[in-house]
Image (cartoon, rainbow, N blue to C red):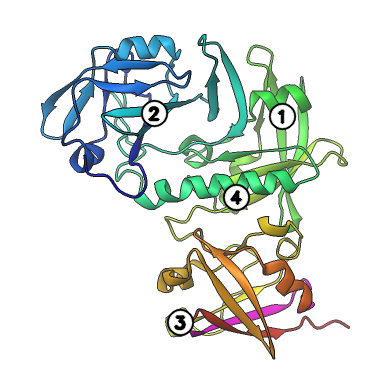
Amino acid sequence: MSMHSSSPGFFKILVHNKFKKELMIPKSFVRKYWEGISNPIILKLPNNREEEVYWSQRKKNEIWLQNGWDEVVKLCHLEYEFLLTFEYKERSCFELKVYDKSASQINYHSDCGVHENNHDYIVVDDHVQREPKAKKRTNKAGIRKSMLNNVREKIEMAEALSTKLKNPSFFLVLKPSYVHGNANLVHIPSSFSRQYLNGLKGSGTIWVSDDEDSNWSINYNFSNIRKRTTIHGGWNKFCKENKLQVGDVCVFEMMTQVNPHSFKIHIIPVTQQPPPTPPHQFQESESPNRQSYNKFELRISKSKLKQFTSSVFVPIPKKFIRRNEICLGKNVTLKYGQESWIVKVVNGGSFSKGWIQFATECKLVVGDICRFKLSDRKNLVFHVSIFKEHRS
């Protein structure tokens, strides 16, 4: 196997009807990395136990885990719709991580006992296998590499934001069943449900963090069997009107001072598909075809002024990022008048560390419009023009 700077890996969702007996390795992974892999491979399980699993090749680039896989299924208590991640380590050894149906990572004690993790997220496999009778595939083209590369960063962003919130919170990376078709049900993690929502039924409200004037009515239901609360009733409308996509990360902040129970939702958009312009983003007055490749504008909203310190994320228009990827992961200079500020542009395409200082010292308020022009690509210098909100 040829190694890269970061360890290669793949993802599998257990939706094949024979997953308890065998599991297919994604063909894209086989084509790139399988040459030189020994038989058997070693799977390092979440409880640090190592198991040998033999594989067989049926067609070109079609590798199936077989002998020994059934033992892994038993040891990890794998069930239908669980998500697995396989990360290659060395010497034909893969590290296995397991996520349950609610997208919560499962931690295993050394005796194979199970307890839950409070972090809740999911990514989609690039070779989803369906039941033979299924006529429709929900993932025809497969997941794009950009999602796999960005999902960890999105999770880190959500975790960082969660630690700064004063209210209880949890986060989810949206899977297809949460956004596609008539999806109208969201499972709140069991651990959060037990601690804050035990037995909750009835109605509530959700709204987006940077548009608190708009809200959506929802209903809660509680399962006595699973000891878990679900959101339904208004979720589908919320998804459609906010144009949520598979892979978007939603941080649910429980507003404890509001009755009935309500959530403020912080949306961290997926970056592999150009999402529609969010409500708070200001568009150039020119026709899109005439917009300059090195300019963009932002209308200042409440979320862009909240002091999450190093965890603030101010999205940059995706069209600008696609044309200026040189900025990603770099510190850039924002110049306004005679002053300048160093601000980090994270790989997801957002201003981060340094933004609050810039916004504070420029006395930005809600409604102000900032125009950014990348005037020096070599040194990543932006000249900023600020148009202040008029007030009577």
Q: Position of residue 39 (x, y in %)?
A: 18, 22
Q: Is residue 190 above or below residue 303?
A: above
Q: Quadrant of residue 76?
A: top left
**Residue extending furthest toward the front:** 91
Q: Which residue is mark 1?
A: 220
Helix, strand or loop status at disc 4 = helix
Q: Badge 1: few (under 14), some or many (20 or more) residues near its Cα, within 10 Å?
A: many
Helix, strand or loop status at disc 3 = loop
Q: Position of residue 341 (x, y in %)?
A: 66, 77
Asked if the magenta segment contains residue 364, the reply would be yes
Q: Are marks 4 and 3 in contact (CB under 8 Å)?
A: no
Q: Badge 3: few (under 14), some or many (20 or more) residues near its Cα, within 10 Å?
A: few
What residue appears at the point 40 percent right and 9 percent down from the top-left corner? 74
**Residue extending furthest toward the bottom:** 338
Q: Is residue 337 above or below residue 251?
A: below
Q: Viewed as shown, does residue 184 lie left or right of 260?
A: left
> Disc 1 or disc 2, which is closer to the eye?
2
Task: Determine which of the numbered discs, if any, sits on residue 377 in the image.
Answer: 3
Q: Which residue is mark 4?
A: 157
Q: Quadrant of residue 255?
A: top right
Mark 1 or mark 2, earlier in chain: 2
What residue appears at the point 32 percent right and 43 percent down from the top-left corner? 142
Comparing 207 with 364, the one in front is 364
Q: Which residue is mark 2?
A: 95
> Disc 2 or disc 4, which is closer to the eye?
2
Q: Is residue 387 above or below residue 242?
A: below
The magenta stretch is: 362-378
Mark 3 or mark 1, earlier in chain: 1
Mark 2 or mark 3, earlier in chain: 2
* Image quarter hosting the N terminus: top left
